[in-house]
Amino acid sequence: MGGTKIKLGLIHDGKVVAQASLAASSHINLITRLAETGDKVDELLAENNAEPMGIGIAFPGIIDNIRYKVLSKYVKYPDAQNVNFSQWAVERWNIPVAVENDAKAALIGEWQFGSGKGSNDLVLITLGTGVGSAVMIGGKVLSGRNFIAGNLGGHMTINMHGRTCTCGNIGCVETEGSTWALVDEVKNAPEFFSSSLSREADIDFKNLFKHAAEGDTLAAQIRDKCLKTWSLGIINLIHAFDPEKIVIGGGIMESHHILLPHIHRMITKHSWVKNNPPELVAATHPQLAGLLGMYHLLTRGKKANSTML
């Protein structure tokens, strides 16, 4: 359940057999949006003549995955902390529910069905609207006393003189290299109106990398700053968790041919593991890993060919 879209998937035997989406409308109450989401789920089930065995929800916030509660006061969905997901699933379909942070769900999905397969010491980082992360050590996803372990890679300080982040911290990776920060930085640059970026309706990383490749000075300058930001953030994660593999997802991975070599060079130059760096890989399922991760959480220990959401 993102801040922009709610993505739905019907999964059978580890494969997404049908998909749908609807606007998040995250300015309204989550309980209202869940009712409307339930209607969309029923449409998806009817269209595919399917019966659900469980429903998984990947949510962009700090999640108590034992009591299935949202802990963080997420800037979207103002009532999220008060929603009883289990009650909703039972009353609507009489099925079990699983709720997990979206980055942790994506990590599990890539571990079971994607680029993390065969590795039990993983870091996943997503680069885009925000910067999210999740960590697995010895085949177990880190959680911690407050359920934040491994989850705040985007909120490590890398610029002590930086801006205050939406989280309240100073100079986070996210304030230096995310889509919401990018828009502010580009539009406030003195060179903005002389830059080809000013002609774009959407200032995002796709357009930033495109104009940088075409020789736009401002775009190239900000692209290089973002590459350094992401590299330093990933080096911090390496030093903290010493993973075998790092899976990178998010819309920015359309430019993986630029991103991955740059980060690799930074790791081999600046990290403590320069002689034995982790493998850097692009996510196999950047749009579906969260769905697949929730499927795994709901079906582990059950028959693998269960049909479910």
Image (cartoon, rainbow, N blue to C red):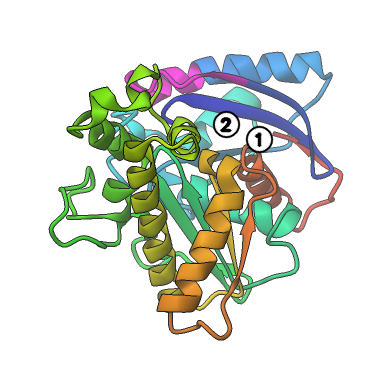
At x 60%, y 73%, the residue is 121
Find residue 28 and report its image quarter. top left
User: For mark 2, does the 10 Å Cα neighbourhood hold few (<14), some (14 to 19), or many (20 or more) residues?
Assistant: some
Q: Secondary structure at mark 1?
A: loop
Residue 221 x, y percent position in the rendering = 33, 46
Task: Give the residue drawn at x 32%, y 20%.
Answer: 27
The answer to whether the residues at label 1 and label 2 have Cβ atoms under 8 Å apart is yes
Q: How far apart are the two marked residues, 1 and 2, measured between alpha carbons? A: 6 Å
Q: Circle 2 sits in a helix, a strand or a loop, which is it?
A: helix
Amino acid carrying mark 2 in the image: Ala
* 247 sits to left or right of 183: right
User: Which residue carries the number 1 mark?
Assistant: 95
Residue extending farthest left? 161
The x and y percentages for residue 194 are 27, 25
Does residue 109 appear left or right of residue 176 in this picture?
right
Residue 287 falls inside the magenta stretch: no
In this view of the protein, can residue 298 be seen by the observer?
A: yes
Task: Assess disc 1: are there few (<14), some (14-19) or many (≥20) residues with their C-alpha within 10 Å of its C-alpha.
Answer: some
Residue position for label 2: 89
Quarter of the rendering containing residue 216:
top left
Residue 96 falls left or right of residue 37: right
Q: Amino acid at mark 1?
A: Ile
In the figure, 141 relative to 51: above or below? Answer: below
What range of the chain is rendered magenta? 21-35
